[in-house]
Amino acid sequence: MAVYKLAPHTFIKEGVFYFVRRIPVELQKHYTSNKIAYSLRTRSVAVAAARAVRAASQLDEYWFHLRAQDSELPGKHMLRLNMSKQAASPQPDEPSLTNNQLKLSECVATYIRLKGCGKPETFRRAAERSCGYVIDVCGDKGLSDYTRKDANAFRDALVARGMAGSSITRIFGR
């Protein structure tokens, strides 16, 4: 029993250590099985523990990247909107047009650039947070593409988050 505690994520089969790790449910679509198991090719507890810890660390890192690629990224509303486009474009006065229409993320970046001069950092964060909530619920669309249905869905999502009425009013007012 003590052998298993010294070598996490392992089991012994005929004296040889094997690595085993269950794949998280949300990542199983990327795999053909619900667990990973393979031989560590050692009978030594110390070697097995080192190899198992390394393999577990590599899997955790890879799984982090798989989760980050998910379109429903938790905390997406906290990202700095449109910052990569601004850094790549030497002329910020020329917004990128898609179907002759600015997306909400581009509009909030322009708003912050034009109205945020001399304002505290909290101004930028509040504007990005509020628009990020909209993008999380309704998607990053052109301004005229948002409908009453989107507004209602956005309001319902804020209520479902347990936000106070004053917070919802403040977010709608931005």
Image: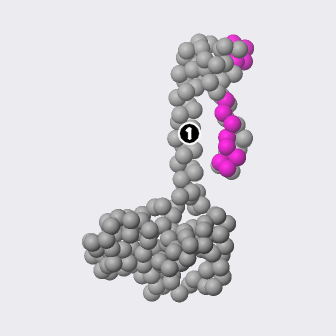
Q: Residue at x 55, y 70 (%)?
A: 167
Does residue 139 appear in the picture of this structure? no
Find residue 15 and report its horizontal and vertical position in percent.
69, 12
Mark 1 residue type: Asp
Toward the viewer: 32 or 108? 108
The residue stretch that appears in magenta: 12-28
Q: Nearer the viewer, residue 134 or 125?
A: 125
Counting from the top left corner in percent of width and height, residue 27 is at 65, 48
Residue 168 in magenta stretch: no
Residue 9 image-quadrant placement:
top right
Kindly identify the residue that appears in the image at 65 percent across and 24 percent down: 10
Query: In this orientation, does residue 5 appear?
Result: yes
From the viewer's perspective, tell me whether residue 37 is left or right of residue 103.
Answer: right
Q: Is residue 53 left or right of residue 85?
A: right
Label 1, on which residue? 60
Q: Return the x and y of residue 135 as percentages of the image width and height.
A: 54, 71
